[in-house]
Amino acid sequence: MNLHQFRFVQEAVKRNLNLTEAAKALHTSQPGVSKAIIELEEELGIEIFARHGKRLKRITEPGHHVINSVDVIMRELGNLKRIGEQFSKEDSGTLSIATTHTQARYVLLKPISELRSAYPKVNISLHQGSPEQVAQMLIDDVVDMGIATESLAQYDQLVTLPCYEWQHVLVMPKDHPLAKKSNIRLEDLALEPLITYHPSYTGRTKIDRAFENKKLHPRIALEAIDSDVIKTYVRTGLGIGIVAEMAVQADGNTSGNASGDSNQDLAVVNVGHLFGKNVTRVAFKRSGYLRNFVYTFAELLSERLSKAAIVSAMNGKATGENDDYAM
């Protein structure tokens, strides 16, 4: 019984029992992966996987127990490596962050720059994806931390804490009639072609829910995951944009944003009264070991994220991780 066998079993599960894909991910041969798994099964005296010919078809009942134990072993192995690095290479290493485009583009620039100043030997690896992909990268130990607005608190494998609040704003040409309206209503927006985020991104669920509660059917002319794309299509006259406020707060006027974008050609109207406040959360894998520079980065990201608060959350104490701010 060895770690290679555990790694092969774990990767086979991640790849939906496709041994060819597992072998590619592990840079080895498919027969080698298959042989290692069979040898582990023979040593344990059970079948971890039910087979049809040479193909893995499903995980057996005892296999589920084995895989749970393998996950614990591999997670603790990763923790041991991080503990060693913490004390042997205290001020160097790689901080891997999974996040959405909006966070990476508008929020993380300042704290990343500050972390590099404090830890010049620490490299930053940014992984962009949907909130669901952010969560999965954490669960799969691809990254140290995840940052997103949607979904993260829904995963039992993760510990999440509120980071900061934000609201949606409208962006439109300055000569648009709504740009001069003092109290914009959802009924006004339902009459306009709208350009906003793809479902599951950047508070889109709040937008949809607001219209549903009023029994209104908005005209979504275009969906995108990128705020810059939304603003570009607004400039072409395709419709009114609904974006996160971070995407229009240029020149570092708000916490974390130093994008330098110029939005002077657009009218910007806050519509927090229509769609409520959103909460961006930071997430860590439960039972993971965090190096000091991870805590430092969290503290740079938000004054709410002290090392003590994160440690308390990771230890399962009162964290507020399921709290939502008043909407």
Image (cartoon, rainbow, N blue to C red):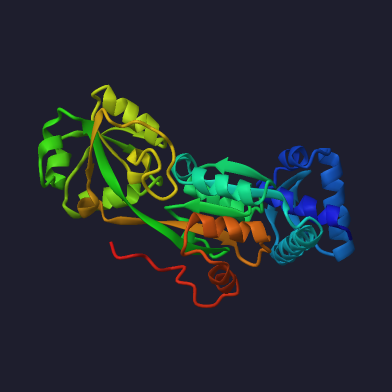
Q: Which quarter of the picture shows residue 315?
A: bottom right
The N terminus, quarter of image: bottom right
Q: Residue at x 33, y 50 (%)?
A: 205
153 on left or right of 275: right
Q: Which residue is drawn at 75% across and 64% down?
A: 76
Q: Residue at x 65, y 53 (%)?
A: 140
Q: Residue 11, percent across and down?
A: 73, 49
**Residue 57 seen by the camera:** no
Q: Residue 12, percent across and down?
A: 72, 48
Q: Residue 121, percent across and down?
A: 71, 46
**Residue 277 seen by the camera:** yes
- How many marks overall? 0
The C terminus, quarter of image: bottom left
Q: Residue at x 53, y 56 (%)?
A: 300
Q: Residue furthest front?
A: 117
Q: Which quarter of the picture shows residue 171?
A: top left
Q: Residue 23, percent across and down?
A: 78, 40
Q: Residue furthest bottom?
A: 317
255 on left or right of 86: left
Q: Which residue lies furthest to the top in this view?
A: 236
Residue closer to the observer: 298 or 39? 298
Residue 128, placed above or below residue 36 = above
Q: Which quarter of the picture shows residue 156?
A: bottom right
Residue closer to the observer: 39 or 228? 228
